[in-house]
Image (cartoon, helix red, strand yellow):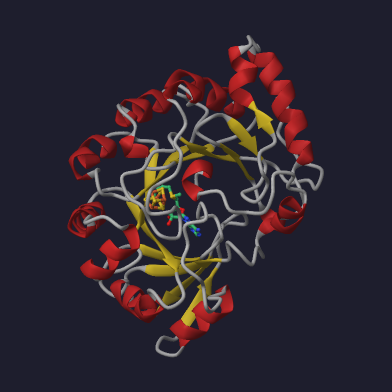
Amino acid sequence: MSKLIDNFGRQIAYVRLAVTDRCNLRCQYCMPAHGIDIVPKQELLTFKEMYRLIRVLTELGVTKVRLTGGEPFVRKDFVGFLEMLSYNDLLDAINITTNGALISKYIADIEKLEKVKNINLSIDSLKAVKFNEITRRNAFDAVFKTMELLEKSTLKLKLNVVVQSGINTDEIKDFVRLTKDRNLAVRFIEEMPFNGNGQREMNENWTFNKILNEIETEFKVTEVQSEKSSTSRNYTIENHRGTFGIIPAFTRSICNDCNRIRITSTGTFKNCLFDDGVFNLREFIRNGASNDDLKKLFLSLVKEKPANGFIAEANRTKGGVSESMSTIGG
Ligand code: SAM
Ligand code: SF4
């Protein structure tokens, strides 16, 4: 079987698929208050098209998929799509990133799907007023309830916390404290400029090192060995049930071991979060491409994967990084 190997010898095993560009929240670091210009429905990939693209990718060695958005659960019958994807015998794991506001009623159904193992829940503040300010919606109670239900479920729970200067940096240690008695992994993410031009000014740069230093003012941490392709560096604290990690999303020190590609909700293939889209898969398949055509295409597209996110950003042709993360699929 041909494998997806780029020019730097990195084997692609993980695809992130945005199932929609729509969202029920308006996080300040992700989009402007009025939202983004969503695309007409017919420009979104259908679930059948997504299933087919993932199937072809798994025949080329992809074993893991992360479903994201926009908010995946905003898309009608997303849980049905999870079931459909579960039939792909070449897939080992289906992970989901969600804001959690709509999902509590689906948790029992999701638990039954053997391949759905990890849920990343985005929660940037443990204080209702602040959370609602960040997301510009009153969703704190629903998201907090989801967190508690997920923690008790059979799913592995990670909390995604975007570290925003002057907004939630005072809560970094509160999030670490949460790992004392709870079986969850907190992952602090460096904020990136993917905000659809909706962001307030950032007055201080909370990088990986700065976040770690802040945590070390109170906790004695030990780094744990992570999977080579992990997006985060991960740590334990003695007597804590949970763990924490930091994702150097903006300082990009993890690119050497990247094993990921992305497909946006409109079918744009991306080799890197920071590139501006490499190929329109939707048109390719709607114009009649066969699975063999798709395989040849993927094998050649990954050869264009840039060495790192800085090169990807420098190679952009459509202007600087400013698109909303909800169009890319974070
Ligand atoms: N709506 C879902 C959610 O919020 O979890 C899935 C899509 S969201 C785009 C995926 C992840 O990207 C979330 O954890 C979110 O916090 C993160 N994200 C969005 N904009 C970001 C930014 N400008 N910088 C860093 N992370 C960002
Ligand atoms: Fe929606 Fe997720 Fe973006 Fe927040 S981060 S606006 S929940 S897509």
Where is 293 relative to 96, above or below? above
Residue at the outermost top position = 288
Where is 180 relative to 299, above or below? below
Residue 47 shows up from this direction: yes
Q: Nearer the viewer, residue 34 or 169?
A: 34
Picture coordinates of residue 272, whole percent (x, y)? 65, 47
Residue at the outermost front position = 34
Left or right: 272, with 232 as reference point: right
Q: Residue at x 39, y 65 (%)?
A: 186
Picture coordinates of residue 275, whole percent (x, y)? 68, 46
Where is 277 relative to 321, above or below? above
Question: Which quarter of the rendered picture does the N terminus lie within?
Answer: top right
Q: Nearer the viewer, residue 95 or 316?
A: 316
Q: Residue at x 51, y 51 (%)?
A: 196
Picture coordinates of residue 91, whole percent (x, y)? 50, 32
Picture coordinates of residue 176, whole percent (x, y)? 36, 75
Q: Residue at x 20, y 45 (%)?
A: 104
Q: Residue at x 39, y 38 (%)?
A: 22
